[in-house]
Image: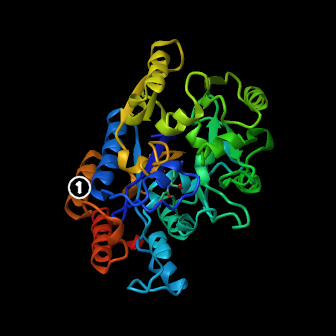
Amino acid sequence: MGMVEINFDGLVGPSHNYSGLSLGNLAATKNAGKIAYPRAAALQGLAKMRHNMDLGLVQGVLLPLPRPDAAFLDAMATGTGGGADPALTAMAWSASSMWTANAATVSPAPDTADGRCHFSVANLVTMPHRSIEWPDTLAQLRVAFADERHFAVHGPVPATFGDEGAANHMRMGPAHAEPCVEIFVYGRPGGRFPARQNEQASRAIARRHGLAPERALFIEQAPEAIAAGAFHNDVVAVANEHVLFTHEQAFADREGAYAAIRAAVPGAEIIEVPAARVSLADAIGSYLFNAQILTLPDGTMGLVVPGECMENPGVRGWLDEMARGNGPIRHVLPVDVRQSMANGGGPACLRLRVVADPDHVDQRFLMTPEKLESMADIVTRHWPESIAPAEIGTPGLADRVISARNFMLECLNLKELG
Ligand code: SUG
């Protein structure tokens, strides 16, 4: 088929819950302790996949990791019964692997020295509940992208340096299948909230992926953006081909960042949303930038935004104007991912972008309309309808969560991930 962008969405796992585990993620903190709806959450995610498939795009999926994480509970020498530490229990139950933008950093084949698509699984060390994801994520990536003629899947960079994957990485250039410039955005520690992406981690990834120095830019995220709740760059900026869609306050040195991008990417178009039109608080509250910019089959671009953007008059007004204007993004496409949004995960968090020939990927991870229907059926039959905080850690629910995932693995013929 040739190289295309494939979005690998994380299927929302059956243990999806609101435990407020991410300091600096304002939505997750605000919704801590609420009742979660895993079945509705997974169906919303599947509907988003269907939406993008209906646009004529190739869609992939990554599966939830085994939860509760028994190996973690075992290593922490805490049981699952009465005396267990509730904080550790919540970590072991988190369905946070749904946000596959944090699974890995991906450098597609046209950008790398050996002409293979490179993956580095993210260590996610800043948040304890996320630091336990990478071994199972790595195992899954090694199955999905097993063909070593086309893919190289690396382990994490040392835990000394926090790495949160593609959420802090953008790629700009003439077209997905052509050599592009990779932009790594890192945070400087010392602010009110943790800076989750360390510059050294980003630089190590660029080196191990074999990016030519002139094809890698390293840009500091604005400390005020992190302090306002932009715990990843993809909460305030997103890029596609020659287009960067960004909030005015995304980068520490705005002018310097734009100049570097314009110098490295011929024809770069920067769509900046001024703070005077949409404040940082409104951008973060609506998740305007946690959007997918998709190149549609007719060559135009569409912006897949969370439905929440339509509820904020300032954001909506800005989007309406943009779509009517002469710019490269002509279609605004709202989707409902409210269950994920309440934990700080919008449309862009839920997907890992890979540029590859779909024929080279393990077909079990590629969606078809029939597969989507079968998966929706399993979710409807086996995913818990709701999870209240008091139920987290109970043996009955643990059994349901484990067996729900097993049904899905069976359906996709992926029992080796068990
Ligand atoms: O790491 N939320 C995730 C949201 C990740 C969003 N990803 C991107 N921006 N790409 C996080 O903060 C909350 C889970 C809880 O609190 O139970 C959580 O992990």
In the image, what residue occupies the spot 41% across and 59% down? 18
Report the amino acid beneath label 1.
Answer: Ser
Residue at mark 1: C-beta within 8 A of ligand 1:
no
> Where residue 247 appears, x then y in whole percent?
61, 30
Quadrant of the snapshot with the C terminus: bottom left
Residue 222 visible? The answer is: yes
Q: Say if 313 sits above or below 70 in the image.
A: above
Return the residue at label 1.
374
Name the secondary structure under disc 1: helix
Q: Is residue 158 toward the left or the right of residue 45 in the image?
A: right
How many marks overall?
1
Q: Is residue 170 toward the left or the right of residue 2 in the image?
A: right
> Which image quarter: residue 53?
top left
16 or 362, nearer to the observer = 16
> Which image quarter: residue 178?
top right
In the image, what residue occupies the spot 66% across and 35% down? 250
Q: Residues within 10 Å of mark 1 (few under 14, many from 20)?
A: some
> Where residue 42 appears, x then y in whole percent?
32, 53
Quadrant of the snapshot with the N terminus: top left
